[in-house]
Amino acid sequence: MFDDFAPKLAKVLTEYSQPVNPGDTVTIYGAADAMPLVEALYEAVLRRGGHPTVELRYSQLQEMFYRHANDDQLAYLPPQAMTWIEQTDIMYNLKAERNPLSLTNVPTEKRAKAREALRPFTEAYFRRFGDGSLRWTIAAWPTEGLAQLAEMGLLDYTEFIYKACALDQDDPVQHWLAFKARQDKLVQWMNGKKHCEVRGPGIEIDFDFTDRLWVNAHGDLNMPDGEIYTGPVEESVNGHVEFSYPTVYLNRQVSGVKLTFKDGVVVEASAEKGEDYLLAQLDLDAGARRLGEFAIGTNTGIQQVTGDTLFDEKIGGTIHM
């Protein structure tokens, strides 16, 4: 069952999400547990005339790194990482965590130091994405660990991703083209308006977006996809929100999050689980307490919480920030 999963998803990624053209340099940055998709993508890139390179991630090595790395090792950025981020045309980032909670007990300061070491890489990534010279897509592959996080069996979880990516459609590429066209109408209706108020159980939020555009997230950067989003005017956000669903960020689970905004800044924050981690992230830098994105989920093929932001932020009929 689902024997066509990897080749179908590879076709969507290389023909729709970020189409590969002859001569493109393509990096497949994949978790080792996504090997069937890595192989299918490698073949698809070759068939379209691209030059594929594979960079594999091993989740068990991450845990070993944080257990044993000293300060110098935490602050080290391998030079080859900068080489490929500066030279690749397309990057496919494949998520397939064997254990999505494997780094739960890693001290926050260690994670922060390692993230700071990656800053030149991250800056190059966003600079090249901003000027259009780097194209990328994040996609997911089912694992036992992710299925367990979603409280599903592996077969059910595999079917969930298969359908969320519209691979059950007769022509998934045409499905996503039609999806993009429908969402274009939504963002056209939103653009030109200036103010947003959200009222409901657990939320009262006001903000201005003035001349900020609403963006159609239609499967180019994420697969699956399905949201429209904007960046609120920074100092305009006021109100409070109680988030209904848990999330896992950088392998740490946080749930029962409550935030209060005043003039664009989080002034109160709490969580039923993972509060220390939440507060540490809010204090990470000068911008961490400001709202960077407000979005509406539009993928009606996703209707259940999995604990994975790639899917949960797309749930049709929800909002996320």
Image (cartoon, rainbow, N blue to C red):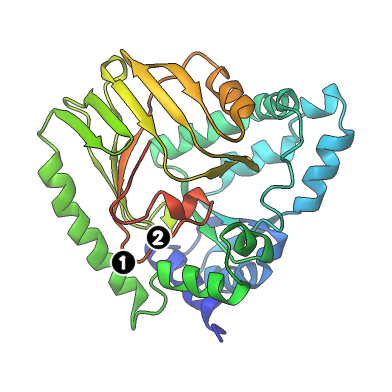
Identity, as a three-letter code, of the amino acid under mark 2: Ser
Tag shown at residue 17:
2
| Residue 148 percent across, percent down from the top left | 64, 62
Residue 259 or residue 143, whichever sits in front:
259
Q: Quadrant of the C terminus?
A: top left
Identity, as a three-letter code, of the amino acid under mark 1: Trp
Give the Cα separation between the discs numbered 1 and 2.
9 Å
The residue tagged 1 is 176
At label 1, counting other C-alpha atoms closer than 10 Å, the crowd grade (few under 14, some 14-19, many 20 or more) is many
When the figure is inspected, residue 169 is found, relative to residue 157, above or below; the finding is: below
When the figure is inspected, residue 148 is found, relative to residue 242, above or below; the finding is: below
Taking the spot 19% from the left edge, 60% from the top edge, the residue there is 181
- The answer to which image quadrant residue 116 occupies is top right
Taking the spot 10% from the left edge, 33% from the top edge, the residue there is 193
Whether residue 116 is visible, yes or no, is: yes
| Residue 168 percent across, percent down from the top left | 40, 79
When the figure is inspected, residue 25 is found, relative to residue 72, above or below; the finding is: below
| Residue 33 percent across, percent down from the top left | 70, 64
Tag 1's secondary structure?
A: helix
Q: Is residue 283 left or right of residue 186?
A: right
At label 2, counting other C-alpha atoms closer than 10 Å, the crowd grade (few under 14, some 14-19, many 20 or more) is many
